[in-house]
Amino acid sequence: MANVSISEDIFNQLTFIREYENNQDGENNAIDSGSIINGYQPRILTDFNLDWQLPADHLAIQLYRDATTVPANRIPFFTAPAINTNFPVGDPNYIPQPRNTSFLPCLIAAKATQVDFRQYDIVSERNSLRKIAMNAEKYAVGVMRYGRTLLLRRYDRRSINRNNVGFLFEEMCTPSYPPGAEYKYLIEGRIGTLRALVTAEIDAVSNENTQTNNSIELTCRKEEEIHNRVDVWLQMFLSGTATLTVGRRSIDEPIQLLGVNNYNIEDLIDQENKIRLLQHLHQVLHFLQANVQEKRNYILYRHPRNQPSNDMGLFLYEITNPNDIQRLQFMPRWMLEQMFVPNQ
């Protein structure tokens, strides 16, 4: 779970730059509806493990190198879980997470694979792109520019509950995967006209499927109907995942696994919804390209305009207070320059 971590005192000191408006750039950013889906073409550059126990300082570069294993030496291979198995649900068991999400694992994985982030227009975690594309909740994403490249990082407070039913279902399906680290892909793709470098957490990998991307999205729920199909499709699309495995569990305790169903990504939502999501994402990224300058720090913030609170707008702010820059800057330029790949 996560929530926005921009406090009111920081928000009140942000400098307003511009509000995003749909289609504000008109024909300049228009793109064929079919090509925006087919053109993404995600390609896995490498996989890596990221330890659950992370440094409190999101800029502790050596500690993050120690916490990141590239390529991965632990892979969560999928094993079909036994039906009627009881979930060993207990009291919440939270893994402490740092206050600020670090951008270092993405760049460490890229450099270890001899990939220079400067050749991309967008560098981001999957979840930052998902929040922008969904356009359905309050969120804050940090933005900075280095040359042509925009780097995006979410501002939220994360927590991992190891006794959550969804987490326990993942463990049921990947029994040979040792606990202690996430499994992630570093992916390149194209969002409309923009080249993107994206990291995505992967729940499981098929040992039988020999295609290049054989990742599996895992989820567990009480009902058979998938109510958040749009969000699930978007997560899978951005990571290049084709298969969704849904566990159905009992309502009453003891909680049991009643069944498992597989879905293909193509069957989750219709073409109109796919196009709507990706065109909105493409337009917002172009909005950022046009308004974000180098050597400055920005926040893309979706929040209520005023009353009523459901009247939401998407706003770009600059962090100008020196103390807030110190607290919120997610990567100083000198550290970015350590992530260059020579002769790229």
Image (cartoon, helix red, strand yellow):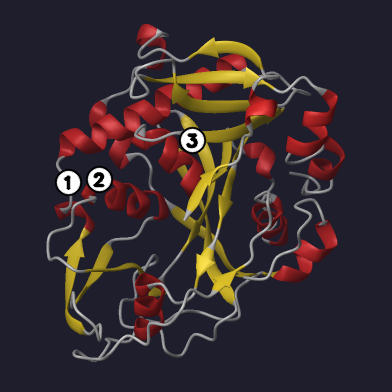
Compared with 159, 59 (above or below) is above
Q: Residue at x 26, y 30 (%)?
A: 276
Q: Could you give the CA–CA distance between mark 2 and mark 3, rounded to whole angstroms?
A: 18 Å
Disc 1 residue crowd, few under 14, some 14–19, many 20+, Cα 10 Å: some
Q: Circles 2 and 1: CB distance less than 8 Å?
A: yes
Of 25 and 166, nearer the camera is 166
The residue under the point 53% across, 75% down is 93
Q: Which residue position is annotated with label 2?
A: 230
Inter-mark Cα distance, 3 to 1 = 24 Å
Any mark on residue 269, and which? 1
Vertical placement of 156 versus 135: above or below? below
Mark 3 = which residue? 139
Q: Dot 2 lies on which element?
A: helix
Q: Amino acid at mark 3?
A: Tyr
**Mark 3 vs mark 1: which is more N-terminal?**
3
Of mark 2 and mark 3, the one earlier in the sequence is 3
Q: Is residue 127 left or right of residue 114?
A: left
Which residue is rendered at x = 18% and y = 57% of the image?
Answer: 226
Q: Quadrant of residue 24?
A: top left
Q: Residue at x 50, y 79 (%)?
A: 75
- Say which of marks 2 and 1 sits in front: 2
Snapshot quadrant of residue 174: bottom left
